[in-house]
Image: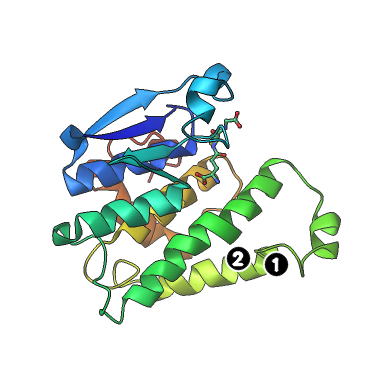
């Protein structure tokens, strides 16, 4: 049985729709780690970062939420949420997965901390997202090309991960709810796996 160390107030919640879409909730023991315990030896012996989420499968520890998404979607590839290794769509799939994990998360963190725009502007060459307008341009292009999902007709784990982050950020006013985002967000809002995600209701999607 796999173990998922998580916290109900954390980014690990992005994984719950994935577990539902894969139909593997009964194959994972979910362990709630309170924030006050995360840096105690019992948990840091598993993840020295003292962070959740963290998946343990057959003794192997997988931390970093995008790694867990990618790992599970690949492990259950027959469920159709990850393009096969030789599928040309695999590259775009990984691009979206890691855009959400890297630049988008960094952008959201800095905006959430109210780091002044001038400071961001000064550091734009070394920040992974670069510039706010580039993040919007990248997302808008992806949303305009989505048909209806990022990779075409079939939903993938990247839609679930990016979509969760987007709706979370929009509900906290970190990202604007641009018209270009609406069809994608509204499509995700209808999925059974997203019904327990509170952020869709917050933005009336
Ligand atoms: N890079 C990690 C970051 C995980 C992370 O920051 N988790 C936060 C909750 S959202 C956490 O566990 N914080 C506990 C702490 O720092 O004490 C990932 O993306 O999975």
Quick one: 94 or 136, which is closer to the camera?
Answer: 94
Give the residue at x 28% y 61%. Answer: 156
Give the residue at x 79% y 58%. Answer: 120
Query: Left of 129 or right of it: where is 71?
Result: left
Quick one: 13 or 61, which is closer to the camera?
Answer: 61
Residue identified by numbered label 1: 130
- In the structure shown, which secondary structural element does the residue marked by tag 2 occupy? helix
Residue identified by numbered label 2: 135
Quick one: 51 or 129, which is closer to the camera?
Answer: 51
Residue 43, above or below 153: above
Q: Is residue 47 visible?
A: yes
**Ligand 1 quadrant assignment:** top right
Q: Earlier in the sequence, mark 2 or mark 1?
A: 1
The picture places residue 86, in percent across and down from the top left corner, at 26, 80
Residue 132, above or below 49: below
Estimate how packed mark 2 is, as few (under 14), some (14 to 19) or many (20 or more) residues with alpha carbons within 10 Å: some
């Amino acid at each position: 049985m796999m173990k998922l160390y998580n916290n109900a107030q954390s980014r690990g919640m992005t994984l719950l729709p994935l577990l539902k879409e894969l139909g593997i909730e009964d194959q994972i023991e979910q362990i709630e780690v309170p924030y006050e315990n995360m840096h105690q030896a019992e948990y840091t012996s598993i993840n020295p970062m003292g962070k959740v989420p963290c998946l343990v499968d057959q003794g192997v520890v997988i931390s970093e939420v995008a790694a867990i998404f990618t790992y599970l979607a690949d492990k259950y590839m027959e469920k159709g949420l990850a393009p096969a290794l030789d599928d040309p769509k695999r590259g775009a799939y990984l691009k979206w997965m890691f855009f959400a994990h890297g630049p988008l998360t960094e952008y959201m963190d800095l905006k959430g901390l109210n780091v002044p725009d001038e400071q961001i502007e000064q550091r734009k060459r070394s920040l992974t997202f670069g510039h706010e307008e580039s993040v919007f341009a990248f997302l808008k292009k992806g949303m305009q090309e989505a048909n209806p999902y990022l990779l075409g007709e079939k939903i993938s784990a990247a839609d679930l991960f990016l979509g969760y982050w987007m709706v979370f950020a929009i509900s906290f006013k970190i990202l604007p709810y641009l018209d270009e985002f609406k069809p994608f967000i509204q499509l995700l809002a209808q999925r059974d796996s997203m019904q327990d995600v509170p952020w869709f209701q917050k933005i009336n999607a």
